[in-house]
Image (tube, rainbow, N blue to C red):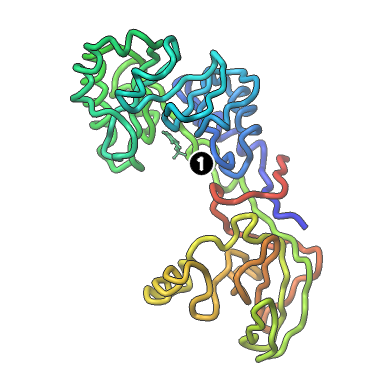
Amino acid sequence: MPLTLRVDAARWRQHLHDTWTDQLVPVAKGNGYGFGRDRLLAEAGDLGARTVAVGIYEEVPAAPDADVVVLSPWRPFLDVPESDRVIHTVSRAEDLRAIPAGSRVVVELQTSMLRHGILADRMPEIASRGTLDRVRFEGWSIHLPMDTGDNVREATELGRAARAVRPGTLWVSHVRTGDLASIGEDVRLRMGTALWLGDRLALDVRATVLDVHPVRRGERVGYRQRRCPADGHLLVVSGGTAHGIGMEAPTAAATVRQRAVTLAKGGLDAAGRALSPYTVGGKQRWFVEPPHMQASMLFLPSSVKAPVVGDEIGVDVRFTTTTFDRVILR
Ligand SMILES: *Cc1c(COP(=O)(O)O)cnc(C)c1O
């Protein structure tokens, strides 16, 4: 009863190829953007990536074929794999002193993100204490917000300040490949979403219809024994909370007030109904009740021709929060 991601492999790889430059550092973290991390690491290898990035130490592959930057910063309490392939991100002065001597390190600078990082202003003093000399310094990391239009300027200024302290590669995010040259020489760009999910038309998500029941208006159905809103069909389709389906507040259907109520309750269905991400007959359909672990129940009005068991229907998912049962490249 699979929730399936079908990938038009030729089209997808064409986009990867068109996007690729030697400065790219493909990011394969979390759920692997829906594809799975192993698949992305293999594709990165085929593209010729010398360095890849993962999110956390647990995601470092057992025997990496490339250098692996771990994006989440090193902390003294983390379990760290022993591999000369691993490049650590260090984002605090005390961690620069505490990380084992000789570790490969990029130093993360604080940006307008205000997530992790050392203030560039503090680096001269920190470096003067020799902290950069006890590690294998691999450069500076600059993590920027979704491109606001100001990212190139911010990267350029931070990079200039940092390189006055110690020359090295600048590892940046969320700028366009075409802007890299204006930031300076020896700049690398971490990229996930725009690389793997940059051509949505290469991707098609399908759920399977598992059951179809005719229903009458007012008939009670589901775990919650809700009443059906009208005559029609109840569809049981693959995909549920275990896949990440319906785990966000619905957007298109709800008024601002409904959304506020829904959010306050921490789930779907504040007004008794929520629009699902499933489409039948070209339209998104209503959930009958919040999704179950691996299946969801939808209502289809009698004006729409019901699918039959085994048919596939479309689903509009967020790839970074969805776990597919199958990923098929063709
Ligand atoms: C996730 C991440 C990226 C990649 O982000 P995308 O928006 O998927 O391209 C780059 N840099 C850092 C530090 C990240 O955590």
Apparent side of residue 120 relative to residue 63 in the rendered image (left or right): left
Q: Is residue 39 above or below residue 222?
A: above
Q: Look at 49% across and 30% down and name the residue there.
A: 78
In the image, is residue 300 above or below residue 248? below
Residue at 36% over, 17% down: 139
Amino acid residing under circle 1: Gly
Q: Position of residue 147 (x, y in %)?
A: 33, 41
Residue at mark 1: C-beta within 8 A of ligand 1: no
Residue 255 location, x and y as percent? 40, 75
The answer to which quarter of the image holds residue 176 is top left
Which quarter of the figure is the N terminus placed in? bottom right
Residue 177, how many percent across, how many down? Answer: 40, 29
Crowding near the residue tagged with mark 1, few <14, some 14–19, many ≥20 C-alpha atoms within 10 Å: some
Element type at mark 1: loop
List the residue tagged with mark 1.
Answer: 198
The residue that appears at 73% across and 70% down in the rendered structure is 236
**Is 21 above or below relative to 11?**
above
- Quarter of the image for residue 216 reads bottom right
Task: Give the quadrant of residue 309.
Answer: bottom right
Query: Which quadrant: the C terminus?
Result: top right
Residue at screen point 34% across, 26% down: 108
Residue 279 horizontal side relative to residue 126, left or right: right
